[in-house]
Amino acid sequence: MSDEETEAPATGASLKVARMVKAPRERVFDAWTTPESLQAWCAPQGMDIPLAEVDLRVGGAFRIRMRDPEGNLHTAAGTYREIDRPGRLVFTWRWEEQPQHGGNRDTVVTLEFHERNGATEVVLLHEGFPEEAQATEHAKGWTSILERLAAQH
């Protein structure tokens, strides 16, 4: 893997959120990488997840389809760039139905999983948004998603 593949975009807005999860980091890492787990929590509060597909390998793709209360679909997709179980996961992120939410380019999500007294601190860095407003909206979504993850464990 080249340095270019693992680096986040150098330009654009970013966000960082963190959350403690009362579970071992292996279990928390696996929650991010198995379709069954993703379907249980990987959408903001009030949404369900009718589809999660994972090809967990560097260069492999994922898709997560979220459905809001009005029935509108929002599908996030991307490619895994780094998989270092249980410490780190890096992938690209884009919206299939609403490219305006991230521009017409992929953004990059880096997850770090830190052991903290029998729990796991999840630190999420999402970089490369064309505008600050998009980063702010995604921060709200990621905060809600991490709260759902924490509630599952």
Image (cartoon, rainbow, N blue to C red):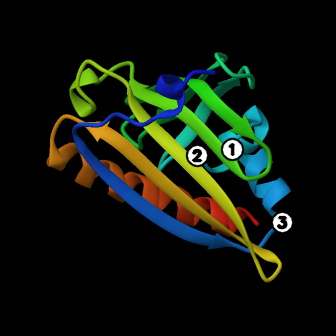
Q: Secondary structure at mark 3?
A: loop
Task: Give 32 or 92, whichever is nearer the viewer.
Answer: 92
What residue is disc 1 on?
A: 32
Classify 10 Å Cα crowding around label 1: few (below 14), some (14-19), many (20 and above).
some
Q: Earlier in the sequence, mark 2 or mark 1?
A: 1
What residue is disc 3 on?
A: 24
Q: Single out the mark in the foreground, 2 or 1.
A: 1
Classify 10 Å Cα crowding around label 3: few (below 14), some (14-19), many (20 and above).
some
What separation in Å lies between label 1 and label 3 (alpha carbons)? 13 Å
Q: Is residue 92 left or right of residue 38?
A: left
Residue extending furthest toward the front: 3
Q: Secondary structure at mark 2?
A: loop
- Residue 22 figure quarter: bottom right
Residue 134: x and y in percent read: 22, 43
Against 123, residue 66 (above or below) is: above
What residue is disc 2 on?
A: 42
The three-letter amino acid code for the residue at tag 1 is: Trp
What separation in Å lies between label 2 and label 1 (alpha carbons)? 8 Å
Can I make out residue 140 in this image? Answer: yes
